[in-house]
């Protein structure tokens, strides 16, 4: 359920940010990798990020075993979990066929991965403590944020992937996550918000100050 914080900057921005953190922390400038090797590492990070995300997402529907709220919520979350579960072995197969793909996060991102895992467990506790519409809203918002990042990750990977077969894989992933994201957004709009969740706070502030939209 938790998800990598990528947004539209994608894998390239993440790689640059992590490199800057390493340089700042150790106080020395590492030897610049050849451009081709940098490209392979960037691409491999995309697979690693997706693998980490789907490894978590595939358990999303298990929460509904103890917190069932509505058939609509169950349908959306179950579909997401099933797709994530199906992606995991496909990624493992790709890693076997293409040695340049490493699914384990490289050392520079290990701390970030652990922080995400801690965030995930905290959010899970919050959801389990809620009930009714509050629980459904929290569950949907979690999926909304996760899917938004994953579809942006897929879009970036479509651009940077050099293998046609692997690019086709990422196009499929992007299409699926776009569809799942749309389903979650539609349910949020129909049952919890009148507009996109990310715009709610901005519109509320405009209403309080009497500003025109």
Image (cartoon, helix red, strand yellow):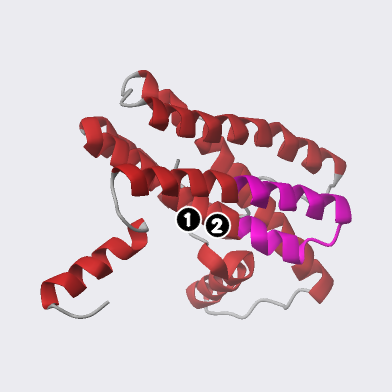
Between marks 1 and 2, how big is the CA–CA gap? 5 Å
Give yes or no for residue 186 being in the magenta stretch: no
User: Decide: marks 1, 2 in contact (CB < 8 A)?
Assistant: yes
Q: Say how many tags the image has.
A: 2
Left or right of 151 in this view: 71: left
Q: Is residue 198 above or below residue 1?
A: below
Image location (x, y in percent) of residue 99: 84, 47
Q: Is residue 203 left or right of residue 41?
A: left
Residue 211: image quadrant is: bottom left
Measured as percent of width and height from the top left, residue 39 is found at: 77, 68
Q: Residue 53 versus residue 145: which sits nearer the camera?
A: 145
Q: Residue at x 47, y 34 (%)?
A: 76
| Residue topped by disc 2 | 109
Label 1 SS: helix
> Which portion, as a residue range, is magenta?
153-177
Where, by quadrant of the figure, is residue 209 drawn?
bottom left
Q: Which label is found at residue 112?
A: 1
Above or below, 93 relative to 202: above
Classify the position of the C terminus by image quarter. bottom left
Can see residue 80?
yes
Quadrant containing the N terminus is top left
Image location of residue 152, percent across then percent down: 58, 60
Magenta: main secondary structure equals: helix
């Amino acid at each position: 359920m938790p998800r990598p914080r990528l947004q539209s900057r994608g894998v390239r921005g993440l790689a640059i940010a992590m490199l800057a953190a390493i340089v700042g922390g150790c106080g020395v400038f590492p030897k610049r990798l050849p451009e081709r090797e940098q490209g392979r590492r960037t691409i491999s990070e995309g697979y690693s990020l997706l693998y980490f995300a789907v490894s978590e997402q595939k358990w999303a529907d298990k929460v509904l075993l103890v917190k069932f709220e509505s058939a609509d919520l169950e349908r959306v979350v179950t579909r997401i979990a099933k797709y994530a579960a199906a992606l995991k072995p496909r990624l493992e197969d790709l890693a076997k066929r293409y040695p340049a793909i490493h699914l384990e996060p490289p050392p520079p991102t290990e701390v970030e991965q652990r922080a995400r895992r801690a965030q995930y467990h905290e959010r899970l506790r919050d959801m389990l403590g809620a009930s009714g519409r509050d629980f459904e809203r929290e569950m949907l918002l979690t999926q909304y944020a996760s899917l938004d990042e994953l579809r942006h990750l897929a879009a970036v990977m479509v651009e940077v992937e050099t293998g046609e077969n692997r690019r086709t894989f990422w196009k499929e992933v992007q299409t699926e996550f776009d569809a799942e994201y749309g389903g979650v957004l539609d349910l949020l709009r129909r049952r919890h918000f009148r507009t996109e969740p990310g715009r709610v706070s901005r519109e509320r502030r405009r209403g309080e100050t009497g500003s025109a939209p």
